[in-house]
Image: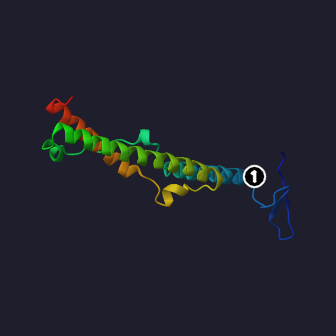
Amino acid sequence: MNAKATPGADGFPVWRNNPWNVPPKVRKKNMKLVHLCMLITVAALAAACAKRPDDIAAVPMDTASYETMSCRSLAVEETRITADLNTLSAAQESAADSDALGVFLLGIPWSSMSGNDKETLISVAKGRLDAIDMVQASKSCG
């Protein structure tokens, strides 16, 4: 591409085939900046998406509230929390799928922005299950 400037009516250079009348080197530099901004925006949107339930870590929980419980009570509590965790995980999967679709179509992680992200509740439930497992192991529950 041969970019040559010709003097315009006002004496300033006019670049052929250049609707912005910007020298080619400057335009190329500006396009790199635009691409960098687009990349940062996409990365930020991807980071805002809801995580998959398997990628959510457990929050460490204190075992004191479970140490006074019998092995049978611990098993009942574990079953209840596991059922809650399964429900939360299904909702989180749905939120992650919606976020992926929203980012693809609109550039917006819709579920995370509308409060459908259950990451905190899942991490607490996983932490409670870990605490129950530690107490069951210390009591030698079968």
Image coordinates of residue 94 in percent, x first then y, are: 52, 48
Left or right relative to 27: residue 9: right
If the image is split into quadrants, where does the N terminus sit?
Answer: top right
Crowd around label 1: few <14 · some 14–19 · many ≥20 (10 Å) = some
Label 1, on which residue? Answer: 24
Q: Is residue 28 visible?
A: yes
**Residue 140 occupies quadrant:** top left
The residue closer to the viewer here, 94 or 123, is: 94
Mark 1: secondary structure: helix
Q: Is residue 126 visible?
A: no
Left or right relative to 73: residue 88: right
Left or right relative to 76: residue 91: right
Work out which residue is located at the far left of the displayed protein and give it.
68
Question: Across the whole image, how many numbered discs are drawn on residues?
Answer: 1
Q: Which residue appears at 14% of the width and 33% of the height?
A: 139
Image coordinates of residue 96 in percent, x first then y, are: 51, 47
The residue closer to the viewer here, 30 or 39, is: 39
Image coordinates of residue 105 in percent, x first then y, are: 65, 53
If the image is split into quadrants, where does the C terminus sit?
Answer: top left
Position above or below: 54 against 36: above
Q: Which residue appears at 49% of the width and 45% of the height?
A: 93
The amino acid type found where label 1 is placed reads: Pro
